[in-house]
Amino acid sequence: MDRIPLLLHTCCAHCAAYTSEYWETRGFQVVLFWYNPNIHPFLEHERRLESVITLAQIKNLPLIID
């Protein structure tokens, strides 16, 4: 049976790690979506983005960055 895709907006890897696992255990194919122009300072924005990229690689999840 094919899993239903679920687009998950992520603000950071910490939140996405738990939330993606929650939805995966309920049969969804999680796709991470990163869009956070409101995170300041810029260094914090870059740290969060890096951590989301790492999480996507570790968990083998698709990641959309906008």
Image: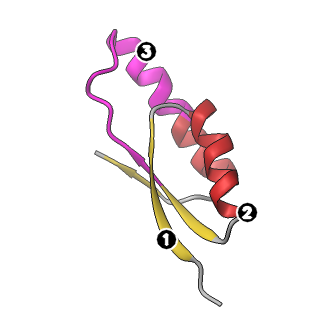
Dot 3, crowdedness within 10 Å: few (<14), some or many (≥20)? few
Depth check: give the residue in front, 56 or 32: 32
- Mark count: 3
Quadrant of the image containing the C terminus: top left
Counting from the top left corner in percent of width and height, residue 52 is at 53, 38
Q: What secondary structure is found at the residue carrying circle 1?
A: strand
Q: Which residue is mark 1?
A: 5
Counting from the top left corner in percent of width and height, residue 19 is at 62, 46
For the residues marked 2 and 3, what is the alpha-carbon distance in whole angstroms? Answer: 30 Å
For the residues marked 1 and 3, what is the alpha-carbon distance in whole angstroms? Answer: 29 Å
Q: Nearer the viewer, mark 2 or mark 3?
A: 2
Q: Which residue is mark 3?
A: 44
Q: Which residues are magenta?
A: 32-51
Please report whichever mark, 1 or 2, sits nearer to the chain's N-terminal start: 1
Residue type marked 1: Pro
Q: Are marks 2 and 3 in contact (CB under 8 Å)?
A: no
Depth check: give the residue in front, 42 or 32: 32
Q: Is residue 43 magenta?
A: yes
Depth check: give the residue in front, 7 or 52: 7
Counting from the top left corner in percent of width and height, residue 35 is at 32, 39
Q: Which residue is mark 2?
A: 25
| Furthest residue toward right | 25
For the residues marked 1 and 2, what is the alpha-carbon distance in whole angstroms? Answer: 13 Å
At 69% from the left edge and 66% from the top edge, which residue is drawn? Answer: 26
For residue 53, side relative to residue 60 (left or right):
left
Q: Is residue 39 magenta?
A: yes
Residue type marked 2: Thr
Q: Nearer the viewer, mark 1 or mark 3?
A: 1
For residue 33, side relative to residue 50 (left or right):
left
Q: What secondary structure is found at the residue carrying circle 3?
A: helix
Counting from the top left corner in percent of width and height, residue 18 is at 68, 42
Please report whichever mark, 2 or 3, sits nearer to the chain's N-terminal start: 2
